[in-house]
Image: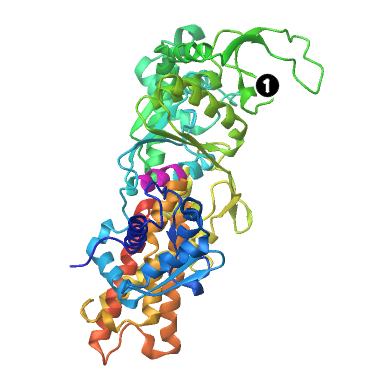
Amino acid sequence: MADTQTLHAAFAARIDAVLDALQAEGTLPPETVRTNVTVEPPRDPSHGDLATNAAMVLAKQAKTNPRALAEAIVEHLARDPDIVEATIAGPGFINLRLSPDAWRRELLAIAELGDAYGRSDMGQGQRVNVEYVSANPTGPMHMGHCRGAVVGDALAGLLEWAGYGVTREYYVNDAGGQVDTLARSAHIRYREALGEEVGEIPEGLYPGDYLKPVGEALAKEFGETYKDAPESGWLELFRQRAVAAMMDMIRDDLALLGIHHDLFSSEAELQAAGKPEAAEAWLREKGLVYDGVLEAPKGKAPPEDWEPVELPLFRSTEFGDDQDRPIKKSDGKWTYFGADLAYHFQKAESADALIDIWGADHAGTVKRIKAAVAALTKGAGRDVPFDVKLVQMVKLMRDGEPAKMSKRSGNFITIADMVEEVGKDVVRFTMLTRKPDAQMEFDFAKVVEASKENPVFYLQYAHARIHSTLRKAGVEPSSAAIDRLGEDELALVREAAQFPRVVEAAAKAREPHRIAFFLGDLAAAFHSFWNAGNDDPSKRIIQESDSDLTAARLFLAAQVGQVIRNGLAILGVEAVEEM
């Protein structure tokens, strides 16, 4: 049976054991803090398989120079049979080259762990609330929501793999003016369903055809009761019915992407429960909210109807903002910021950390909301880290030209349109092929192109190629002869073996795109390994005259396929078996 501790974790433990020994010898003091010690591949692979900065970061505590401490560490490491070379580079970095058997054992570990390879207990079950999408419930999901939806869902999956307890949350903005606009738009479609000729939808209302079924349902339920009734008689009712219908539509649209939230929190319910008032009281107690007058709009003469009004203001200038921000409007209603900070306070009551996925257009709000949440949580005796990940918009193209809008929505392309045309997996993986804060183009033609330049195809093709080879080989994969695997094969193992380390690093950084980047590199390494057989028949996976070597190479290919599946599982993408 394989040792199922993954290679990087095993060697990090061995470095730790060496540091224990040095403490016992007196080279390191007993209270040495090792928090910043790392064990990871060197930037230049020619330097070795692993590198550690232990001597660099511990030398000061040891009251010696880094190179002298590195020599003491290397002396111990040289006794390890799995380390064939330990060298000191520069001022004190230590590079390690591992034995072939160490990599062969890692191949066995992949097979032993299977679907669990790469999973980690790093999170120790800490509760992380990931809030993403949270689009206003006024219409179908469109491309403005898609990238953030995928990034948030992939991040949630990544954190689960790394041992965190994750809650996927959607904040329903059902208390603002936009839902009143929705109700009025639904009322027009209600009258239309009753046979009235409504003509062009007035400017400022929602024109999409998606509200026609809502109007029809209202007409069926209420008949002509509200056809000529004053707005005060139907606005609240139509708002509730329309929001519920939109949320059903939104859930259906997100399900097309494989996205399912655990919790939907209502802004209207939050306000009804008095949560913003409670948050305001906390902030006043800490001196972070006060009653003051906003400055007149800058850069131009104030509007004729502008009057100085005293409002409750949050001291956001203390956190880098250019002015303090109101948490209430002059009519007594909560500002978006005021309601938002109360919502985050509520989330923090049942989480150890908060992560929000926002559009990049909200960048200016980040400092003040983080400051307010920090004040609220610390004031309540808890320190709840809060991170905001900003996601840039996606420019939709078709063969290099801007894509046309959707008939269903009226003025945008919906997620349903996208998934119908190119498929869920293509949409999800493509959204993760760039860092979220980088600009992105999504070309409907290019994302389904069967070429090396298309990262989705190139990765899926690698997995399908592996599956096809295993199916057609006529020989069962076997680890019996893995000692026959040489340098070319072990180079592929080295690439696959990065996966557990990448998972932990990506989870720590809250960056699921790192998994997509890793999978792209692994696919490229496998295709290169495969293509080498085109030039040199002895490097082909299937060797008709050598069944043992064939079985060992098939075993290798099967484990590469396993790692690809595991990575895609984190991202919510299916690994295809044929193309």
- Image position of 540 with respect to 202: above or below: below
Q: Position of residue 142 (x, y in %)?
A: 51, 40
Q: Amino acid at mark 1?
A: Gln
Instruction: Check the image and report above or below for 486 versus 90.
Output: below
| Colouring method of the image | rainbow
Where residue 315 sits: x, y (%)? 61, 19
Answer above or below: position of 139 versus 90.
Answer: above
Which residue is the extreme one toward the bottom? 545
User: Which residue is depicted at the point 67% across and 7% down?
Assistant: 309
Q: Which element carries disc 1, helix, strand or loop?
A: loop
- Compare residues 32 and 234 and report the one nearer the observer: 32
What's the magenta bit mostly, secondary-structure-wise?
helix
Q: Residue furthest front?
A: 26
**Is residue 98 shown left or right of residue 472?**
right
User: Which percent across, then down, holds residue 276?
Assistant: 47, 15
Query: What span is colored magenta in the figure?
Result: 151-159
Pick whichever, 192 or 114, lies toward us: 114
Which residue of the protein is positioned furthest toward the left in this rendering? 1
Image position of 227 with respect to 412: above or below: above
- In reply to whether residue 527 is colored magenta, the answer given is no
Q: Which residue is mark 1?
A: 323
At horizontal 55% and vertical 38% (from top left) the residue drawn is 359
Q: Quadrant of the N terminus?
A: bottom left
Within the image, what quadrant is residue 256 found in?
top left
**Quadrant occupied by the C terminus:** bottom left
Decide: few, some or many residues near mark 1? Use Cα within 10 Å; few <14, some 14-19, many ≥20.
Answer: some
Side of 350 relative to 534 (left or right): left
